[in-house]
Amino acid sequence: MADIDHPAPSLARVPPRVRKIIHIDMDAFFASVEQRDNPELRGKPVAVGGSRARGVVAAASYEARVFGVRSAMPSVTAARQCPDLIFVSPRFDAYHAVSQQIRAIFAEYTDLIEPLSLDEAYLDVSEDRRGIGSAQKTASEIRARILEVTGLTASAGVSYNKFIAKLASDQNKPDGMCVIPPASGAKFVGSLPVRRFHGVGPVTAAKMERLEIRTGADLCARSLDYLQAHFGSSASYLYNAARGQDDRPVRSHRAAKSIGAERTFETDLTDRDALMAALDRVTEAAWARIERNGACGRTVTLKVRFSDFHTITRARSAVVTPDQPASFRNAGIALLGAMLPTSSGIRLLGLTLSSIDHNDGVDEEFQSVLPL
């Protein structure tokens, strides 16, 4: 009898590799750095950014959060909610230095690091480089190393995909860790309010509330057709997220979406010359970042916040290369000029470059606009 050649096992029968993802999130990062460096601030409610009468809170200590103080809150509101709140000016050089220390620690455990900002990142530790034995033990060791090197605490989420790892890192804050294995993913997501889902902002959350979608379980009960009818291009993401599914890999060279700067003024501005001078200062700060990163872009966006906190953005196409600061500046001048004169006081101006073509060296922390 002739030998029978047995076909090789089908690749479809090989179970997919389960990723081991850690999301590290520093606890009240900016405020914690300030409290670490100034013992007089420890144990007290601290807000980084703004002032008692002006500006916006960039970060709040946990002592301030007890009073409802949150980042992006107008400083005057924060001061009203917490009369003893201490405002400190941001020191981005200090935060950047600590962030570099933290990233060096990450690199001891994996090359697959995707920073989201100065104070948080995804790590893929599927390859156990140091033979620690599990992602949970790896996360514990990383948190201990961060505390040892920086004197600051970090929280961690450990799971099989990025979506759940990020949700989990917020579960036991501050200075905590949450581990969600594959068998528990869908149940964990189902128990959470949809407003905690990354990508579900206030407008979408309000729409979901009107549709009686309040939890992950409510969202999971809706069909893909239903979600497409109500949420359009976001439907697939929401459908998969509600089931604990997320196939996105950790990208070690995550491209910045925009690079720019913004500034809140001590007094509201209405005078054209004063506004143009202020825009020049914002433009110089933004361009320093663009030039440092060697970024090219196709869209310049002006951000304007009025005295009543109403905020608008205006954009125009303008091909900008690293040797064309005039193109960037002129686009900003044209955008602001089209809004003048104005009788409403302006408290903030920002200018960003987006639709960016990247070189490999683009710094991750500038994917969002940093205040000056």
Image (tube, helix red, strand yellow):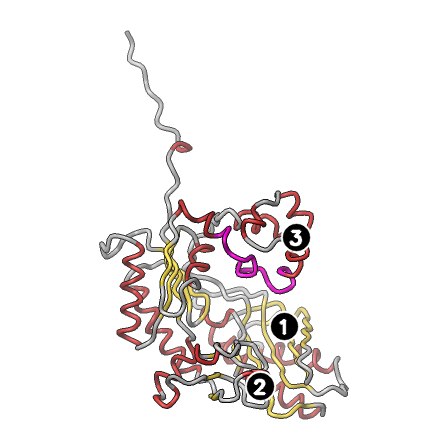
Q: Earlier in the sequence, mark 2 or mark 1?
A: 2
Q: Is residue 35 above or below residue 119?
A: below
Q: Earlier in the sequence, mark 2 or mark 3?
A: 2
Q: Which mark is residue 80?
A: 2
Residue 358 in percent (x, y) is at 50, 65
The kind of secondary structure element at disc 3 is helix
| Label 2, residues with CA under 10 Å away: few <14, some 14-19, many ≥20 | some
Residue 164 visible within the image? yes
**In this view, the mark in front (3 or 1):** 3
Q: Which residue is mark 3?
A: 231
The residue at the point 48 percent across, 83 percent down is 48
The residue at the point 59 percent across, 74 percent down is 352
Asked if the stretch drawn in magenta spans residue 190, the answer is yes
**In this view, the mark in front (2 or 1):** 2
Residue 282 in percent (x, y) is at 58, 84
Look at label 2 and name its amino acid: Arg
Q: Which mark is residue 211?
A: none
Q: Which residue is mark 1?
A: 300
Residue closest to the far left: 131
Gap in Å between the C-alphas at discs 3 and 1?
A: 28 Å
| Magenta-colored span | 189-205
Residue 356 in percent (x, y) is at 55, 66
